[in-house]
Amino acid sequence: KIQFDTNVTQLKQEGSRLVGVHTSKGFVESDVVVLAAGTGTPELCNPLGCHVPVTSSPSILIRMKTANKRIHTLISNAQFEARQLTDYTLLAAEDYIDESEENGPQAVGKRAYDTLRRSLKHGNQLELESIKVGWRPMPEDGYPIVGFHDHMNGLYLTLMHSAITLAPLIAHLAASEIIDGKSRNELDPCRLSRF
């Protein structure tokens, strides 16, 4: 069952077991909670005494409208990083520098937009939709954290900076661990226990 527009407000534990989540629409009981809350992970885990070493890393996200698909893969080069989000939406990302007029999000985003308009075939048809700062989860050592929590039964963590890229693989491996109950060796370097 998918619940849209529903915020998770608290994880509920009984002893050393996680038994569900409190949400803005009530309590949801669960045998396993897969926590894929990005930068919100520490806020949810800390009250349980479950420290997860992650910080927030800002990135400037530039969203553009396109008449049709312009990019068929991820493009990452010295000039820009962009991908096609939908057939009619292009998303570019730039490093966050500071809040100054010259290097603030709006200035950096506008420069990236201008570069894409010049660089892509039919780029002059791109239409700027928004420039925002997104907050990416950054595990302390930069590598993904994936797997069951060592001290809280029923809590499965999926936390990584590169979530959009790794989501299909991580989802497949995580589902295998949760459903089959067998540890996947591919995820051994990603365990929380390494900290």
Image: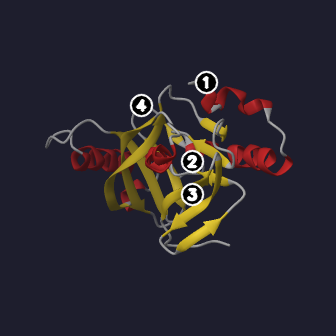
**In the foreground, 100 or 63:** 100
The Cα atoms of the two marked residues, 4 and 1, are separated by 34 Å
| 119 w.r.t. 193: above or below | below
Q: Do the residues labelled 2 and 4 touch (CB within 8 Å)?
A: no
Residue hosting label 3? 12
The Cα atoms of the two marked residues, 4 and 3, are separated by 46 Å
The Cα atoms of the two marked residues, 2 and 4, are separated by 21 Å
The quadrant of the picture occupied by the C terminus is top right
Q: Which of marks 4 and 1 is in front?
A: 1
Residue hosting label 4? 78
Farthest residue, direction bottom: 25
Q: Position of residue 71 (x, y in %)?
A: 54, 51
Q: Which amino acid does label 4 sit on?
A: Ala
Label 1 crowd (10 A; few <14 / some 14-19 / many >=20): few
What is the image's colouring?
Answer: secondary structure
- Label 3 or label 1, whichever comes before in sequence order: 3
Q: Nearer the viewer, mark 3 or mark 1?
A: 3
Q: Nearer the viewer, mark 4 or mark 3?
A: 3
Describe the element under mark 2 as helix, strand or loop: helix
The Cα atoms of the two marked residues, 2 and 1, are separated by 23 Å
Describe the element under mark 3 as helix, strand or loop: strand
Residue hosting label 1? 194
Q: Nearer the viewer, mark 2 or mark 4?
A: 2
User: Can residue 177 be seen?
Assistant: yes
